[in-house]
Image (cartoon, grey):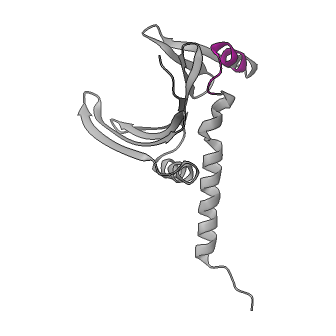
Amino acid sequence: MLMKPSGTFFLANAFGLLVTSIAHAADPADLGGFMLGWTLKEAQDHARAQEWTLAPISENLPRSWTVEGTNLSLIICNGVVSSVSEMLTGDFEQFTALVVSMQLEFGRPEIQILSFPSGVGVISTIDARFDMAGGGASVQLQSIGGNRTFSTNRWIESEC
């Protein structure tokens, strides 16, 4: 007897494909091709090869660099790339799909939820943090005065 797949079967598989594609597109281990532990020169060479510009964000933030032409930013600590962050397109659904995907790969995250009033409106964040040997990864959904952002960050342990 041949069984006909149910609507639930198709929905579950479609969700699985969505989670997989989002996780692949936002893989925190391969953000823009930058590698944690690279020297500043290696990061600059990589950016130049992609026709991007690696520039300091501000004199007041000497370790923070933006990758112009992308949604990426780097933290350079003692001349070494110690963090890569990416602003992503998406909202709550993409955030949860990525957290679920990363949980399958890295285990249960530490979750922190904050909401407080400020001069620009209410600031609310949901952070999922995955601690790993030698570093970690996080996914954050943030709303500032109703404007949402969605980002990932991957880092290695370092002393600055």
Residue, far bottom: 1
Is residue 45 part of the magenta span, yes or no?
Answer: yes
Stretch of the chain drawn in magenta: 36-46
Q: In which quarter of the image is the N terminus?
A: bottom right
Q: Residue furthest front?
A: 133
Instruction: Report if residue 153 is visible in the image.
Output: no
Q: Is residue 43 above or below residue 91?
A: above
Give the residue furthest to the top. Answer: 59
Residue at 53 percent across and 17 percent down: it is: 77
Q: Nearer the viewer, residue 47 or 149?
A: 47
Q: Residue at x 25, y 30 (%)?
A: 118
The answer to whether residue 142 is visible is: yes
The quadrant holding residue 53 is: top right
Residue 105 position, x and y percent, is 58, 50
Q: Is residue 80 magenta?
A: no
- Residue 116, placed above or below residue 21: above
Percent across and percent down for residue 111 are 39, 46
Which residue: 62% across, 16% down?
A: 54
Relative to residue 148, is residue 20 drawn left or right?
Answer: right
Instruction: Judge from the rendering whether residue 112 lies leftward or rightward of residue 10; answer left or right.
Output: left
How many marks overall? 0
Residue 21, percent from left and from top:
65, 50
x 47%, y 51%: residue: 108
Image spot of residue 83 (x, y percent): 54, 26
The overriding secondary structure of the stretch rendered in magenta is: helix
